[in-house]
Image: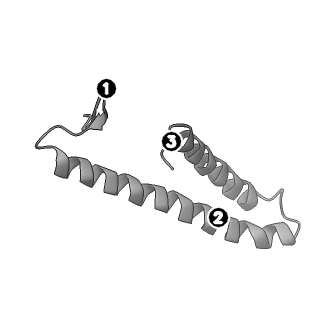
Amino acid sequence: MERYTQHSRTGWQVPEGLEQAAAERLAHFEDAYEDIRSKQARLEEQMEPLRAAGKQKSVRFRELLGEKLMLQQMVMILESHGLT
């Protein structure tokens, strides 16, 4: 991935001419982050009835749990880089 930012003594900067590309990439990142968070909420909604029915050991529940954990790991990586 090509970097659109450079770090200097005064902080982060976007080289002249790359401002629009950097803004678009940031917008795509923000869209992706919102998508991850909404998928997490939808998974929780799908898991709750299964949990209430005592089906935590079902294949479907485990699939949902695996996806939820994967998304949770992605959020943790982003948080560790200060991106949330």
Q: Which residue is mark 3?
A: 82
Q: Residue at x 52, y 43 (%)?
A: 78
Which numbered disc, 1 or 3, marks the residue that appears first in the sequence? Answer: 1
Mark linked to residue 9 = 1
Which numbered disc, 2 or 1, marks the residue that appears first in the sequence? Answer: 1
Q: Amino acid at mark 2?
A: Leu
Q: Residues within 10 Å of mark 2 (few under 14, many from 20)?
A: some
Report the colour scheme. Answer: one colour
Q: Which residue is mark 2?
A: 43
**Disc 2 versus disc 3: distance between alpha carbons?**
25 Å
Examine the rendered structure and indicate whether residue 63 appears above or below residue 2: below
> In the rendering, at what x and y percent does residue 83 appear?
48, 45
Q: Quadrant of the N terminus?
A: top left
- Give the quarter of the image for residue 55: bottom right
Labels 1 & 3 near each other (Cβ < 8 A):
no
> In the rendering, at what x and y percent does residue 50 appear?
79, 69
